[in-house]
Image (cartoon, rainbow, N blue to C red):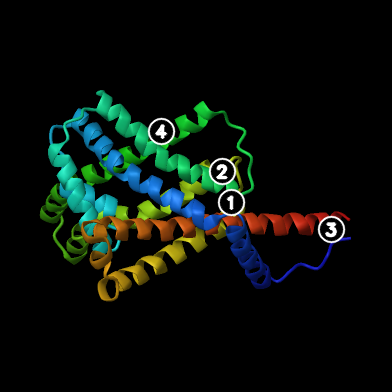
Amino acid sequence: MTGKRQDPLALGLRAFFRALGRFGDKGGWVMSSHVAMSVMMALFPFVLFVVALAGSLSRDIPVDDLFTLLLGSWPQEVAAPIERELRAVLATSDSGLMTLGGVLALYFASNGVEAVREAMARAYHDTDPRPYWQRRLLCLGLVIAGAGLVLVGIAVDVVWPIYSNMLRNAVPGEVTSWFTGVGVSWIFVAAAPVLGVVAVHVLLPGRRHGLRQILPGIVLTLVLAGLAGWGFSIYIARFAAYSATYAGLAGAMSALIFLYLNAAILILGAEFNGALIDEAQGESDHAAG
Protein backbone atom coordinates (compact mmCIF):
# COMPACT_ATOMS: atom_id res chain seq x y z
CA MET A 1 0.00 0.00 0.00
CA THR A 2 1.38 3.39 -0.98
CA GLY A 3 1.38 6.28 1.46
CA LYS A 4 -0.15 9.70 0.86
CA ARG A 5 1.97 11.91 -1.39
CA GLN A 6 3.68 14.65 0.60
CA ASP A 7 3.24 18.35 -0.09
CA PRO A 8 6.25 19.47 -2.21
CA LEU A 9 6.66 22.70 -0.22
CA ALA A 10 6.67 20.88 3.11
CA LEU A 11 9.05 18.29 1.68
CA GLY A 12 11.38 21.01 0.39
CA LEU A 13 11.40 22.87 3.71
CA ARG A 14 12.05 19.72 5.67
CA ALA A 15 14.86 18.76 3.30
CA PHE A 16 16.34 22.26 3.53
CA PHE A 17 16.49 22.22 7.32
CA ARG A 18 17.83 18.69 7.19
CA ALA A 19 20.51 19.91 4.77
CA LEU A 20 21.46 22.67 7.20
CA GLY A 21 21.88 20.06 9.92
CA ARG A 22 23.94 17.81 7.65
CA PHE A 23 26.07 20.78 6.65
CA GLY A 24 26.92 21.57 10.27
CA ASP A 25 27.33 17.98 11.43
CA LYS A 26 29.79 17.10 8.65
CA GLY A 27 31.98 20.16 9.09
CA GLY A 28 30.58 22.08 6.17
CA TRP A 29 32.20 25.36 7.20
CA VAL A 30 35.59 23.68 7.48
CA MET A 31 35.14 22.05 4.07
CA SER A 32 34.06 25.42 2.65
CA SER A 33 37.29 27.02 3.81
CA HIS A 34 39.25 24.17 2.22
CA VAL A 35 37.42 24.62 -1.09
CA ALA A 36 37.78 28.41 -1.00
CA MET A 37 41.51 28.28 -0.31
CA SER A 38 42.04 25.61 -2.97
CA VAL A 39 40.09 27.58 -5.59
CA MET A 40 41.94 30.77 -4.67
CA MET A 41 45.27 29.01 -5.08
CA ALA A 42 44.07 27.44 -8.34
CA LEU A 43 42.90 30.74 -9.86
CA PHE A 44 46.35 32.08 -10.71
CA PRO A 45 47.65 28.81 -12.23
CA PHE A 46 44.42 28.55 -14.23
CA VAL A 47 44.90 32.01 -15.73
CA LEU A 48 48.52 31.14 -16.55
CA PHE A 49 47.37 27.92 -18.22
CA VAL A 50 44.74 29.79 -20.26
CA VAL A 51 47.34 32.28 -21.44
CA ALA A 52 49.80 29.48 -22.25
CA LEU A 53 47.10 27.60 -24.16
CA ALA A 54 46.16 30.76 -26.03
CA GLY A 55 49.82 31.41 -26.78
CA SER A 56 50.10 28.03 -28.45
CA LEU A 57 47.28 29.03 -30.79
CA SER A 58 47.96 32.73 -31.31
CA ARG A 59 50.60 35.25 -30.37
CA ASP A 60 48.33 37.73 -28.62
CA ILE A 61 45.41 37.27 -26.28
CA PRO A 62 43.06 40.14 -25.34
CA VAL A 63 43.75 40.23 -21.61
CA ASP A 64 40.86 42.62 -20.91
CA ASP A 65 38.40 40.16 -22.44
CA LEU A 66 40.00 37.34 -20.45
CA PHE A 67 39.41 39.07 -17.13
CA THR A 68 35.90 40.10 -18.13
CA LEU A 69 35.01 36.47 -18.80
CA LEU A 70 36.74 35.10 -15.69
CA LEU A 71 35.77 37.73 -13.12
CA GLY A 72 32.74 39.36 -14.69
CA SER A 73 30.32 37.60 -12.33
CA TRP A 74 32.28 38.68 -9.24
CA PRO A 75 31.43 41.89 -7.36
CA GLN A 76 33.62 44.69 -8.69
CA GLU A 77 35.03 45.43 -5.25
CA VAL A 78 36.26 41.84 -5.02
CA ALA A 79 37.38 41.38 -8.63
CA ALA A 80 39.40 44.60 -8.97
CA PRO A 81 42.29 43.75 -6.60
CA ILE A 82 42.50 40.16 -7.87
CA GLU A 83 42.60 41.39 -11.46
CA ARG A 84 45.38 43.80 -10.56
CA GLU A 85 47.49 41.00 -9.08
CA LEU A 86 46.76 38.70 -12.01
CA ARG A 87 47.92 41.36 -14.45
CA ALA A 88 51.14 41.71 -12.46
CA VAL A 89 51.71 37.96 -12.63
CA LEU A 90 51.05 37.85 -16.37
CA ALA A 91 53.45 40.72 -16.94
CA THR A 92 56.33 38.70 -15.48
CA SER A 93 55.38 35.15 -16.49
CA ASP A 94 56.83 33.46 -19.53
CA SER A 95 55.65 29.86 -19.35
CA GLY A 96 54.66 28.02 -22.48
CA LEU A 97 52.05 25.30 -22.64
CA MET A 98 54.51 22.42 -22.87
CA THR A 99 57.08 23.80 -20.45
CA LEU A 100 57.42 22.69 -16.85
CA GLY A 101 55.66 25.88 -15.76
CA GLY A 102 52.68 25.18 -18.02
CA VAL A 103 52.36 21.59 -16.77
CA LEU A 104 52.59 22.69 -13.14
CA ALA A 105 50.01 25.42 -13.76
CA LEU A 106 47.60 22.81 -15.11
CA TYR A 107 48.22 20.47 -12.18
CA PHE A 108 47.82 23.14 -9.49
CA ALA A 109 44.69 24.49 -11.17
CA SER A 110 43.20 20.99 -11.03
CA ASN A 111 43.65 20.95 -7.24
CA GLY A 112 40.78 23.41 -6.94
CA VAL A 113 38.53 21.04 -8.86
CA GLU A 114 39.69 18.13 -6.69
CA ALA A 115 38.68 20.03 -3.54
CA VAL A 116 35.21 20.64 -4.98
CA ARG A 117 34.96 16.97 -6.00
CA GLU A 118 35.69 15.81 -2.48
CA ALA A 119 33.14 18.24 -1.02
CA MET A 120 30.44 17.10 -3.46
CA ALA A 121 31.05 13.42 -2.80
CA ARG A 122 30.74 13.99 0.95
CA ALA A 123 27.59 16.07 0.54
CA TYR A 124 25.89 13.39 -1.56
CA HIS A 125 27.04 10.64 0.85
CA ASP A 126 28.77 8.99 -2.10
CA THR A 127 31.72 6.67 -1.84
CA ASP A 128 33.75 7.44 -4.93
CA PRO A 129 34.71 4.09 -6.52
CA ARG A 130 36.98 5.73 -9.09
CA PRO A 131 40.74 5.22 -8.56
CA TYR A 132 42.98 8.19 -7.86
CA TRP A 133 44.33 8.45 -11.38
CA GLN A 134 40.83 8.56 -12.85
CA ARG A 135 39.71 11.26 -10.42
CA ARG A 136 42.80 13.31 -11.19
CA LEU A 137 42.31 12.92 -14.95
CA LEU A 138 38.72 14.11 -14.52
CA CYS A 139 39.93 17.23 -12.68
CA LEU A 140 42.60 17.90 -15.30
CA GLY A 141 40.05 17.42 -18.07
CA LEU A 142 37.66 19.91 -16.48
CA VAL A 143 40.44 22.50 -16.21
CA ILE A 144 41.34 22.02 -19.88
CA ALA A 145 37.65 22.17 -20.87
CA GLY A 146 37.19 25.34 -18.82
CA ALA A 147 40.22 26.95 -20.44
CA GLY A 148 38.91 25.96 -23.85
CA LEU A 149 35.52 27.53 -23.15
CA VAL A 150 37.21 30.74 -22.03
CA LEU A 151 39.21 30.87 -25.26
CA VAL A 152 36.07 30.21 -27.31
CA GLY A 153 34.34 33.05 -25.49
CA ILE A 154 37.27 35.37 -26.19
CA ALA A 155 37.39 34.37 -29.86
CA VAL A 156 33.66 34.93 -30.31
CA ASP A 157 33.88 38.27 -28.50
CA VAL A 158 36.63 39.36 -30.89
CA VAL A 159 34.90 38.14 -34.06
CA TRP A 160 31.41 39.31 -33.13
CA PRO A 161 31.98 43.08 -33.72
CA ILE A 162 33.35 42.32 -37.20
CA TYR A 163 30.33 40.19 -38.01
CA SER A 164 28.03 42.83 -36.52
CA ASN A 165 29.46 45.55 -38.74
CA MET A 166 29.09 43.37 -41.82
CA LEU A 167 25.50 42.55 -40.88
CA ARG A 168 24.66 46.19 -40.20
CA ASN A 169 25.96 47.23 -43.59
CA ALA A 170 24.18 44.42 -45.40
CA VAL A 171 20.83 44.57 -43.58
CA PRO A 172 20.15 48.03 -42.13
CA GLY A 173 17.22 48.45 -39.79
CA GLU A 174 16.18 48.76 -36.16
CA VAL A 175 16.11 45.01 -35.55
CA THR A 176 19.56 44.61 -37.03
CA SER A 177 20.87 47.52 -34.97
CA TRP A 178 19.55 45.92 -31.80
CA PHE A 179 20.96 42.52 -32.78
CA THR A 180 24.40 43.87 -33.60
CA GLY A 181 24.48 45.85 -30.38
CA VAL A 182 24.26 42.73 -28.27
CA GLY A 183 27.57 41.85 -26.62
CA VAL A 184 28.77 38.29 -26.27
CA SER A 185 30.90 38.56 -23.16
CA TRP A 186 27.93 39.25 -20.88
CA ILE A 187 26.22 36.11 -22.20
CA PHE A 188 29.29 34.06 -21.28
CA VAL A 189 29.53 35.76 -17.88
CA ALA A 190 25.91 34.88 -17.15
CA ALA A 191 26.11 31.34 -18.52
CA ALA A 192 29.48 30.32 -17.05
CA PRO A 193 28.32 30.04 -13.40
CA VAL A 194 25.26 28.03 -14.47
CA LEU A 195 27.32 25.65 -16.59
CA GLY A 196 29.91 25.36 -13.83
CA VAL A 197 27.37 24.45 -11.15
CA VAL A 198 25.66 21.93 -13.43
CA ALA A 199 29.01 20.32 -14.32
CA VAL A 200 29.96 20.10 -10.64
CA HIS A 201 26.74 18.25 -9.75
CA VAL A 202 26.81 15.99 -12.80
CA LEU A 203 30.48 15.00 -13.02
CA LEU A 204 32.12 15.31 -9.61
CA PRO A 205 30.06 13.21 -7.14
CA GLY A 206 31.06 9.60 -6.64
CA ARG A 207 28.19 8.33 -8.78
CA ARG A 208 25.82 9.80 -11.32
CA HIS A 209 22.50 11.23 -10.20
CA GLY A 210 19.47 11.95 -12.35
CA LEU A 211 18.55 15.45 -13.45
CA ARG A 212 15.51 15.50 -11.18
CA GLN A 213 17.75 14.65 -8.23
CA ILE A 214 20.30 17.40 -8.84
CA LEU A 215 18.11 20.20 -10.22
CA PRO A 216 16.73 21.44 -6.85
CA GLY A 217 20.22 21.92 -5.43
CA ILE A 218 21.40 23.64 -8.61
CA VAL A 219 18.54 26.14 -8.45
CA LEU A 220 19.10 26.71 -4.73
CA THR A 221 22.82 27.26 -5.31
CA LEU A 222 22.31 29.78 -8.12
CA VAL A 223 19.67 31.75 -6.21
CA LEU A 224 21.68 31.90 -2.98
CA ALA A 225 24.89 32.71 -4.87
CA GLY A 226 23.20 35.63 -6.63
CA LEU A 227 21.87 36.97 -3.35
CA ALA A 228 25.25 36.46 -1.67
CA GLY A 229 27.08 38.31 -4.45
CA TRP A 230 24.66 41.22 -4.27
CA GLY A 231 24.80 41.40 -0.48
CA PHE A 232 28.56 41.01 -0.30
CA SER A 233 29.13 43.81 -2.81
CA ILE A 234 27.03 46.12 -0.65
CA TYR A 235 28.87 45.01 2.47
CA ILE A 236 32.28 45.60 0.89
CA ALA A 237 31.31 49.00 -0.49
CA ARG A 238 29.66 50.40 2.64
CA PHE A 239 30.70 48.57 5.78
CA ALA A 240 33.83 46.48 5.39
CA ALA A 241 37.23 47.89 6.32
CA TYR A 242 39.57 45.04 5.44
CA SER A 243 42.42 47.45 4.73
CA ALA A 244 42.46 48.44 8.40
CA THR A 245 42.75 44.81 9.48
CA TYR A 246 44.71 43.10 6.70
CA ALA A 247 46.61 46.07 5.18
CA GLY A 248 48.05 44.98 1.81
CA LEU A 249 46.21 41.64 1.97
CA ALA A 250 42.78 43.31 2.02
CA GLY A 251 42.03 42.48 -1.63
CA ALA A 252 43.02 38.84 -1.24
CA MET A 253 41.03 38.49 1.98
CA SER A 254 37.86 39.96 0.45
CA ALA A 255 38.17 37.53 -2.47
CA LEU A 256 38.83 34.62 -0.12
CA ILE A 257 35.76 35.41 1.99
CA PHE A 258 33.67 35.77 -1.17
CA LEU A 259 34.86 32.34 -2.34
CA TYR A 260 34.23 30.97 1.15
CA LEU A 261 30.59 32.05 1.02
CA ASN A 262 30.10 30.61 -2.45
CA ALA A 263 31.78 27.34 -1.47
CA ALA A 264 29.42 27.04 1.50
CA ILE A 265 26.44 27.70 -0.78
CA LEU A 266 27.65 25.11 -3.29
CA ILE A 267 28.06 22.47 -0.58
CA LEU A 268 24.69 23.38 0.93
CA GLY A 269 23.05 22.89 -2.47
CA ALA A 270 24.57 19.42 -2.69
CA GLU A 271 23.47 18.66 0.88
CA PHE A 272 19.97 19.77 -0.08
CA ASN A 273 19.94 17.29 -2.94
CA GLY A 274 21.30 14.61 -0.62
CA ALA A 275 18.53 15.33 1.90
CA LEU A 276 15.89 15.13 -0.83
CA ILE A 277 17.32 11.82 -2.00
CA ASP A 278 17.18 10.50 1.57
CA GLU A 279 13.60 11.72 1.93
CA ALA A 280 12.61 9.97 -1.30
CA GLN A 281 14.38 6.80 -0.18
CA GLY A 282 12.54 6.97 3.14
CA GLU A 283 9.21 7.29 1.33
CA SER A 284 10.09 4.28 -0.86
CA ASP A 285 11.03 2.18 2.15
CA HIS A 286 7.86 3.21 3.97
CA ALA A 287 5.72 2.36 0.95
CA ALA A 288 7.44 -0.99 0.50
CA GLY A 289 6.93 -1.79 4.16
Disc nearer the start of the sequence (1/2): 1
Residue contact between numbered discs 1 and 2, judged by CB atoms under 8 Å: yes
How far is the residue under mark 1 from the one under mark 3? 26 Å
Disc nearer the start of the sequence (4/1): 1
**Dot in front, 1 or 3:** 1
Residue for point 29% across, 69% down: 236
Residue at the extreme bottom of the image, as rendered: 238
Q: Which residue is mark 2?
A: 205
**What numbered label is drawn on residue 113?**
none
Q: Which residue is mark 4?
A: 140
Q: Which residue is mark 1?
A: 123
Give amino acid for label 2.
Pro
Q: Position of residue 1 (x, y in %)?
A: 89, 60
Secondary element under disc 1, as helix, strand or loop, is helix
- In the rendered structure, the answer to whether residue 70 lies left or right of residue 15 reads left
Give amino acid for label 1.
Ala
Q: Compared with residue 235, is residue 145 higher up or lower down, i.e. above or below?
A: above
How far is the residue under mark 3 from the one under mark 4? 43 Å
Q: Compared with residue 103, is residue 77 higher up or lower down, i.e. above or below?
A: below
Q: Which residue is mark 3?
A: 287
